[in-house]
Image (cartoon, grey):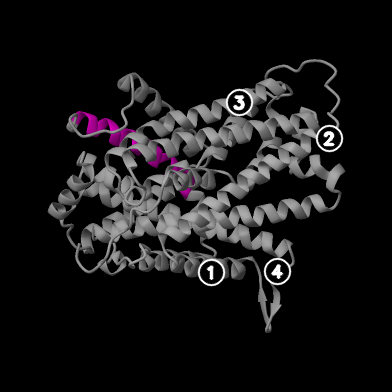
Amino acid sequence: MDGRGHLLRVLGLAFGLAAVIGSVVGQGILRAPGIVAQASGSEWVLLALWLAGGLLALLAALPLAELGAALPSAGGIITFAGRAFGPGMRVIAAFTMLLMQVTAAAVVAFVAGELLVRLGVGGDVFGWTVGPSGLAIALLAGLLLVNTLGTQVNGMVQVGLSAFKGAALIALVVALFAQPGAAPPPEPSAIAPAGWLAFGTAMLVIIGSYNGWGDVVVYGEEIDDPGRNLPRSLFGGIAGVMVLYLAVNLALFHAMTPAALARSDFPAADALGSTLGANADLAFTLFGVVSIGALCSLGVMSTGRIAYAAARDRILPRWFDKVRPNGAPLRAMTLVCAVATAFLWSGSYLALSSTSVALSQATMLLFALCSIALMRREPGLHRPFRIRAYWPVMALVVGFDALLLAIIIAQDPWFSLAGFVLVGALAGGYRLLGPRMDEAAIEEREEAWISPD
């Protein structure tokens, strides 16, 4: 390497699992069961839906595990798309990921700001009214400061925060099972009494509750033995989330009837209301602050890696590919926080977050298409993790991803298509005004990554 520094391989399997669990588990699991319960009055049907959502996440993760193990890169889909489809798709993937991730960081920071306001933080400070946006910007600045401590320290912080989330949900399960059980319904309910549309809506909510597991691949250059630990992180993390989600739902079914669950906007708080009283809302607000704050912290780390990789490929200015000796790509993370702050000041993050839903699902489909393209073009590529029954399985993955993308676009065609147009405009602007990539250097770097040695 030249004097620009490089990422350090100092993260282990524990961080990989924490990155998956931490990216997926948020406050949503405390709200989503109420929405899902509107689809059916049968506890076993609802549990089957949550189980199916986890299994679909495991299915969708297969091509990501294969690509992440074969091409462990901070760029993630940027690297996969470039190798599979060429430089043009590398640029499109870069702007897609950057737009999605920076917007997500702004949204998550704003939600954390809202929760802090509920706790009484903010208000009038030195004559300035500090609301959710101001607190969100302060949170981003604080997280950037923490990231100056380096990759190893931040990795341990993420492990601790994810462990806290898991412990908090386990404590919730124990507390709910300690209560007297709810009276059983008078008679079994039909599978879909509210109609199959509600059934499909419930499935979309569940799939959304499992989203976020793919971010771990951007740590491919920093996780030890990525050929083994990236697939283990993905599948182990998703399986762990699935167990937590099923346990929370079982505990809620013990404390509430499905009908009562369906009427609740915040079922976990309502279920614990008899035990904690008015403190239930405070307890869950505190959990939300830590949980959403952890999501934001991980988002800054992950998006910083993507921005660093884009700069290294000359999609962004090379100034941002400098890495500190402790492994932190601080310039890239500063760029991420600065753009997220601009979105927060302008309020544009709300509109952009709507466009990113379809882009996120399109990225999942692109993962699968990259895997197929590379299997055809480079069947001899060293793949530490291989998908068994490759072609039938990948047909299922592509079909599922494409169907979900079509549903998302049909639900919100304006914002969905606007997202694709915006990415196309950014990529087109780069092709006209941006520098040429050093494709030889990129190929040499990738060959070093995929060496079995």
Quickly name the residue at label 4.
Answer: 121
Question: Could you tell me the amino acid type at mark 2?
Answer: Gln
In 3D space, how far apart are the residues under numbered discs 2 and 4 (Cα atoms)?
33 Å
In 3D space, how far apart are the residues under numbered discs 1 and 3 (Cα atoms)?
39 Å
Label 2: how many Cα within 10 Å (few below 14, some 14–19, many 20+): some
Give the vertical position of 279 relative to 169 (above or below): below
User: Quick one: SS at disc 2?
Assistant: loop
Find residue 365 and report its horizontal and vertical position in percent: 38, 36
The image quarter containing residue 6 is bottom left
Give the vertical position of 383 relative to 391 (above or below): below
Location of the N terminus by quadrant is bottom left
User: Quick one: SS at disc 1?
Assistant: helix
Location of the C terminus by quadrant is top left
Q: Which numbered mark, 2 or 3, is in the foreground of this view? A: 2
- Which of the two labelled residues, at mark 1 and mark 3, occupies the earlier sequence position? 3
Question: Could you tell me the amino acid type at mark 3?
Answer: Leu
Quickly name the residue at label 2.
Answer: 179
Quickly name the residue at label 3.
Answer: 49
Quickly name the residue at label 1.
Answer: 142
User: Quick one: SS at disc 3?
Assistant: helix
Range shown magenta: 356-376
Give the vertical position of 181 relative to 212 (above or below): above
Question: Could you tell me the amino acid type at mark 1?
Answer: Gly
Q: Is residue 374 magenta?
A: yes
Q: Please report contact status of discs 1 and 3: CB closer than 8 Å, yes or no.
A: no
